[in-house]
Image (spheres, rainbow, N blue to C red):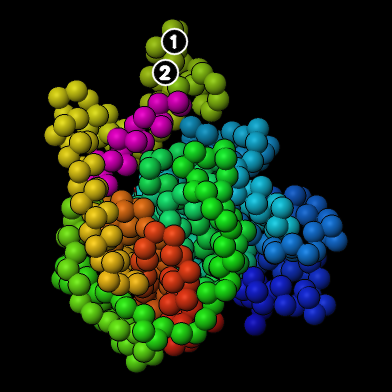
Amino acid sequence: MNIYDLTIHELKDKLAEGELTPAEIKDAFSNRINEVEDKVKSYITITEELADEKVKDYENNKDEILAGIPIAVKDNMSTDGIETSCGSKMLENYKPPYNAAVIECLNKAGAVIMGKTNMDEFAMGSSTENSAFFNTHNPWNLKHAPGGSSGGSAAAVAAGECAAALGSDTGGSIRQPASYCGVVGLKPTYGMVSRYGLVAFASSLDQIGPITKDVEDSAIMMNVIAGHDEKDSTSVKGKKEDFSKYLKNDVSGMKIGIPKEYFELDFNEEVKQSVLAAVDKLKEAGAEVETVHMTDAAYALAAYYVIAPAEASSNLARYDGVRYGLRSEEADDISTMFTNTRHQGFGDEVKRRIMIGTYALSSGYYDAYYLKAQKVRTLIKDDFDRIFNDFDLVITPTAPNTAIELGSKSDPLEMYYTDIFTVPINIAGVPAISIPCGFDSNNLPIGLQMIGPHFEEGKIIQAAYTLEKLLNIKDKRAEL
Ligand code: GLN
């Protein structure tokens, strides 16, 4: 295997055994970036010098969890003095004066940050095509999208341009691109990972999580980023867990629910069969699998596309050209400056969301849309609570399809439909992982989603680790 194909834990082993030096590792990933980045285009910014500095500093960090490990970060996490564009013209060249909490965690853990990855503008999208800068290409087939909105992070991991990456997930943006790129993506329970310094999209749904080459790396990354942070008022108090203790090859007696209503939706047959075949393997390994009934996911999708735009319309009001970010020069008075700045700085999808959100919150419509959506949200959360009284996990496909072709979906509603299986999880605030479970007839990866109760990332990690062993496809890499 090439150095750039190795997982975090494999690289750590090689460092510990003295088989590789941090400089050799960093160079292997940098060379890989030089070799494939023209084709894949995962990164908006590459932080070569900082990475070299961190490698030089290795001796001072060498006992930390991620010492010497190359990591990529989605471009909506604030990095002190380093451009954090959020995939938007509005924040092009914006250099935050502080680090997001997760960046502090990575730094403390000795990680070598390789750069900031491409994304849909303000994390709104499912293919990374809403980036204001360029498209990212799926390493499994360059004509296809990597998914989104953390498409740059997922593509970078799949292409060996970093060992692992951070993404953010508001309605599926870690899991869906992980599924499309054949890697592992974990969305933690809401409140498990600090959102301090994450550029806000929909604050009640946003959560940061890892995108990795395997489940073991996901547990390692969670050990680095999870935990209470007083700078985020929604951060959960409690003692830090060691997620690696759940890396156990055992699902015997685990109760898994298969939601009938989800599998009855109209979606790709190859995806459905691949997920069901994986479920059979878990059953053979001793899991108890039962069909369960859940609220139609279409209600969650409808509620999401009211709640998320409503919160976004409020969060994005701050981009007015006054304090930071883009300011339109073509204005004689302040009100025209506001208008022109927002007109020039935001792309079409972001404008669409701001308009929908403002409409849903306006007086007269608030009760009909926003309030109703919040009630649906409660019903969905109750639905998961009810299921998890009797079951340890629920399994669904991650996405209703495999990676779409770039430029193939121009209707926003069709694009929104790719979030059908991931959105209910954010609505309920529960954790979920996407792991690769097979390939379609075009050799594009298929993702399986495991959902657990609040704060039960451990159960998910254990079941996903076991399934990964049963499927034995985790070392298959995209050929570039
Ligand atoms: N695709 C969804 C959207 O466009 C989810 C995005 C996300 O999770 N950030 O809103």
Q: Is residue 264 visible?
A: yes
Residue at the (52%, 34%) spot, across then down: 91
Name above or below for residue 122 compared with residue 287: above
Q: Secondary structure at mark 1?
A: helix
Q: Between marks 2 and 1, how big is the CA–CA gap? A: 6 Å
Quarter of the view holding residue 460: bottom left
Name the quadrant of the C terminus: bottom right
Residue 239 point in image, percent of width and height: 57, 56
Q: What mark, if any, has residue 157 been given in the picture?
A: none
Residue at the (81%, 71%) spot, across then down: 21
Q: Secondary structure at mark 2?
A: helix
Other-residue count near label 1 (Cα within 10 Å), few / some / many at <14 / 14–19 / ≥20: few
Q: Is residue 374 magenta?
A: no
Other-residue count near label 2 (Cα within 10 Å), few / some / many at <14 / 14–19 / ≥20: some
Which of 373/239 is in front? 239
| Residue sitting at the far bottom | 284
Q: Give the mark count.
A: 2
Q: Which residue is mark 1?
A: 334
Name the quadrant of the N terminus: bottom right
Name the amino acid, label 2: Phe
Q: Which residue is mark 2?
A: 338
Quarter of the view holding residue 464: bottom left
Residue contact at pointers 2 and 1, CB within 8 angstroms = yes
What predominant SS class does the magenta segment belong to? helix
Residue 454 point in image, percent of width and height: 39, 59
Residue at the (68%, 37%) spot, across then down: 81
| Region in magenta | 303-319
